[in-house]
Amino acid sequence: MLNSLKLIKNYDKTTHISRIPAKTNILENLEYIYEPNWDINPDSAPYEIVTQLMDCYYCLPERPDLAALFCWQAINNSYNQYLLADPSTQRLQDTKGIIELISHIHGNATKYLPYLMPYYMNITDKTYRYVASYILKGYAIDQSGFSEKYLSSSYVTFKKKFPTIFQIIANSYGYAYHSITSAALIGNRVLLNINDSDKSRKIIHSFSLKLRELIENGTTEIDEKYPTSTRQTINFSDEDKITFVLFSILYASRCNNFHGNVASRLNSIYANQESFAMYTNIFLLEYITLAISLNEQNILSDSSLAKLKANESLIIT
């Protein structure tokens, strides 16, 4: 924290960049989203998305977390097009737009999953721990009876999108995690007051492994502890996987960062090379998702989409 204070008291960009745990320069070898027809007919290019892509590239390689924010804004514009084309839609809503995007991707899963799965299979451990953490912390706050305003939107969305799975988690990992907390409202913040930090880490880690199994294998088993000990099997369809990644990873990351609910990711005192890898892979996953959305809407050709397979080599494993 002291180093951060020194930097904002007398800002120096070179010093700032030197503190960022950059691991690789993906911009050097990134295959760009680009359609040759745009050279012939510039007006056919999606103007707003072009401007967001410029900012993505400006942030790389040092700040893949910021590049991911701009890339999501491009994705946001792309799924808004589905809603704008629907006469029954009266208001643009992120949730509805993302659902439309999921529907269009899943509707052509044979074509698009081969583009997505290399990224799904290489989601970092830290990403899964991030998801596991906000779900379990949200559950502990929820169970403690505080106002809904203290619940993260990411937690609320997961609870709504996966109600059956959520209940199994609540009766297992949620039950175990809540039992080691003693939440209290201090000022405008809810402090969980965890009484066993080692157990907390182990619960989050174990849960994160189950989330990985769901994405990579499509199934996992979880032992419920409450109200009785029961082993439950959870299955994830391809549509579930797309929904989980878009809502619980990409959109959750965007919302937490965009709304200022967390420390700036790569400026955090906890930022390390694992953080850099996490957001590099998130950016790359968003990038191919954007390309798929543009292809599905006939803005990007099949041949231009196919060129982006080369970006799989940039995934940090």
Image (spheres, helix red, strand yellow):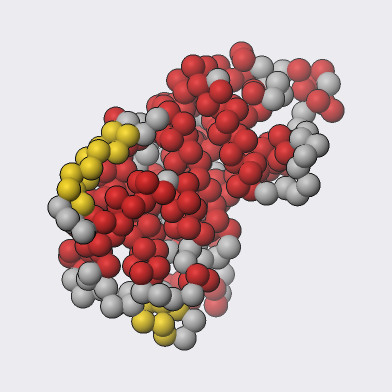
Which residue corresponds to the image point at 23% horizontal and 55% vertical from the top-left? Answer: 172
Seen in the picture, residue 64 relative to 7 is either above or below; the reply is above
Seen in the picture, residue 189 relative to 277 is either above or below; the reply is below
Q: Position of residue 231 (x, y in %)?
A: 18, 44
Q: Position of residue 208 (x, y in %)?
A: 29, 48
Say left or right for 317 vs 65: left
Residue sitting farthest toward the front: 227
Say left or right for 142 vs 152: left
299 or 238: which is nearer to us?
238
Question: Which quarter of the figure is the C terminus placed in?
Answer: top left
Question: Which quarter of the figure is the N terminus placed in?
Answer: bottom left
Quarter where residue 173 is shown: bottom left
Q: Is residue 121 visible?
A: yes
* Number of numbered discs visible in the structure rendering: 0
200 or 226: which is nearer to us?
226
Seen in the picture, residue 223 relative to 12 is either above or below; the reply is above
Q: Position of residue 246 (x, y in %)?
A: 50, 41
Which residue corresponds to the image point at 17% horizontal and 55% vertical from the top-left? Answer: 228
Which residue corresponds to the image point at 72% horizontal and 18% vertical from the top-left? Answer: 36
Say left or right for 21 vs 86: left
Q: Position of residue 293 (x, y in %)?
A: 62, 29
Q: Is residue 279 visible?
A: no
307 or 195: which is nearer to us?
195
Say left or right for 261 vs 237: right
Which residue corresponds to the image point at 60% horizontal and 27% vertical from the top-left? Answer: 104
Residue sitting farthest toward the top: 303
Residue sitting farthest toward the left: 229
